[in-house]
Every structure is written in structure tokens, then in C-alpha cells.
Image: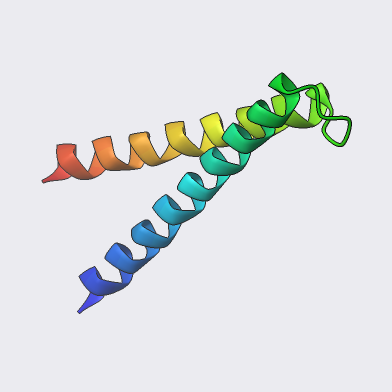
Amino acid sequence: MPHHGAVALFGHALRTVSAAQNAAHQLQKEVSLDSSTVSIEETMIAMQRSNVGFQMALQVRNRVVQAY
């Protein structure tokens, strides 16, 4: 069935977005603790990547709901 492939793909995308959000959150924590191993620039980029991934997943979900 073609639906299983789409579900698996969307599930993988959600796990990827979740991992990006977790990584950005961890970097935020390290920056707030004044860690010298993490730059504010690196943290901001990770946060933006996380946000873009989330917005994309949200748009896909909205389109699927709309089509249903």
C-alpha cells in the first residue's frame, strides 16, 4: 500500500524535526550557562533550522488534514 510509505516518511520527518528541536534546546541551555564550547551564532542557527523544520511539518500536516 502506498500509504505506508507516506506514513513512514512523515514519521521520519517528525523524528528529524524533534531531534533538531532537542539539539537547539540543548545549545540554548549551554549558552545560558555561559559555556565556552558553544557560540551564540551556532545556537541561533540551530534554533532557526528547528523552527523551519517545525513550520514545514505543520504545513504538511495542514495539507493532509485539508485533503482528508
Horizontally, is 60 left or right of 28 in the view? left
Q: Residue at x 71, y 24 (%)?
A: 44
Location of residue 34 with respect to 60 vertically, above or below: above
Measured from the top left, where is residue 9 in percent x and y?
A: 39, 64
Measured from the top left, where is residue 6 in percent x and y?
A: 31, 65
Q: Nearer the viewer, residue 12 or 36?
A: 36
Q: Nearer the viewer, residue 52 or 29?
A: 29
Q: Residue furthest bottom?
A: 1
Q: Quadrant of the N terminus?
A: bottom left
How many numbered marks are there? 0
Q: Nearer the viewer, residue 49 or 36?
A: 36
Measured from the top left, where is residue 64 in percent x and y?
A: 22, 45
Q: Residue furthest left?
A: 68
Q: Residue at x 53, y 49 (%)?
A: 19
Location of residue 43 with respect to 4 vertically, above or below: above
Q: Residue furthest front?
A: 33
Location of residue 41 with respect to 67 vertically, above or below: above
Location of residue 57 with respect to 9 vertically, above or below: above
Residue 43 occupies which quadrant of the picture? top right
Horizontally, is 19 left or right of 41 in the view? left
Q: Residue at x 32, y 72 (%)?
A: 5
What colour scheme was applied to this rendering of the protein? rainbow
Q: Residue at x 81, y 29 (%)?
A: 35
Measured from the top left, where is residue 38 in percent x and y?
A: 82, 33
Horizontally, is 63 left or right of 23 in the view? left
Residue 46 occupies which quadrant of the picture? top right
Horizontally, is 15 left or right of 7 in the view? right
